[in-house]
Image: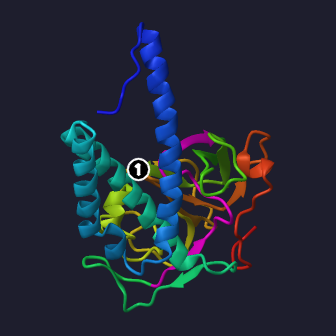
Amino acid sequence: MKDVIPCESIDEIRANIDRIDAGIVSLIAERGGYVKQAACFKKTTDEVKAPQRVEHVINKVRDLARELGADAAVTEQVYRTMIAAFIDAELVEHASRQINSSSEPIVINLTDSQSIDAESGSASLTFLQLTDGWNADLNAPNPTTQVDGRDLLLKFDLDAMQFPDFELNEFAILRFENCERYRLGATNDEGWYRGKCRFSSLAPAWGEFYLIRGADPLLALPADWQAVGTPSGQGQHFLFYFRENTFECVADQVVIEPNADNGLVRTGKKLRVPSSVRK
């Protein structure tokens, strides 16, 4: 086993553990950078999940743990948890790279021949991606909502790892004007990739913010919608996929809240607003 420095107090032990943790976090960040790079070399989600590669890594670290006199079972458990988290992040990155190769608004058109649900028939929907050089934190976005008169405020942590313009723990605030209704609930990212979200086979990618255009026969399907105001007839359907849940809102429009603490304001970020969307 690697030599451990003899300690004379619990404070000294904790100081050494903190020092080691700092090194581990630094290595995790470095590993995460390579994981994101790997996504651009993989063509399918099966290549991202790569179960044979996972087992190869697990076997290697388990053998290394034994050589160092560490607990191989604990090492394996830690690595399986870490690899699963990295695969989740790489799946999001892989999906994003498939649609983010252009600076133009991302428009995905779906024809009537593409089935939404066996019971609800089919429809023609368009998903317009609204993020532009920013996104919610992949792992812990911590979304919260607040009703403000007839509007709804959505607050969430920004992804400072992918977008270094942001500071760690910096957040964004979006205002949905004249909100009719909203929901913040299931499904999480795992459910989306397993096809358990009603838009799993339709939306271009998990972890993005969309405006959905077209008649959606599944709009009223979730039972957790929260009413805010009276429908104006001008409502648009917004969809934001977060790590552990999904945000949806029907409102006249969305704007970046002009708050000095809003990371999107501080960095001058914008919503990607095509001409077909009301400003």
- Rendered location of residue 117, percent (x, y): 30, 76
Q: Quadrant of residue 133?
A: bottom right
Q: Residue furthest top?
A: 9
Q: Residue 240: x and y, percent?
A: 52, 59
Query: As drawn, is 87 to the left or to the right of 152?
Result: left
Task: Point out the stretch of residues depicted in magenta.
Answer: 124-147
The reply to whether the magenta stretch includes residue 137 is yes
Q: Nearer the viewer, residue 195 or 150?
A: 195
Where residue 212 sits in the image (x, y, percent)?
A: 54, 72
- Can you see residue 6? yes
Q: Which residue is mark 1?
A: 244
- Residue type at mark 1? Glu
Magenta span dominant secondary structure: loop
Q: Secondary structure at mark 1?
A: loop
Q: Is the N terminus in the top left, top right, bottom left or bottom right quadrant?
A: top left
Residue 245 lies left or right of residue 74; in this view the side is right
Residue 39 at what x, y percent from top left?
A: 47, 71
Q: Residues within 10 Å of mark 1 (few under 14, many from 20)?
A: some
Q: Residue at x 67, y 47 (%)?
A: 173
On the question of residue 225 being in view, the answer is no
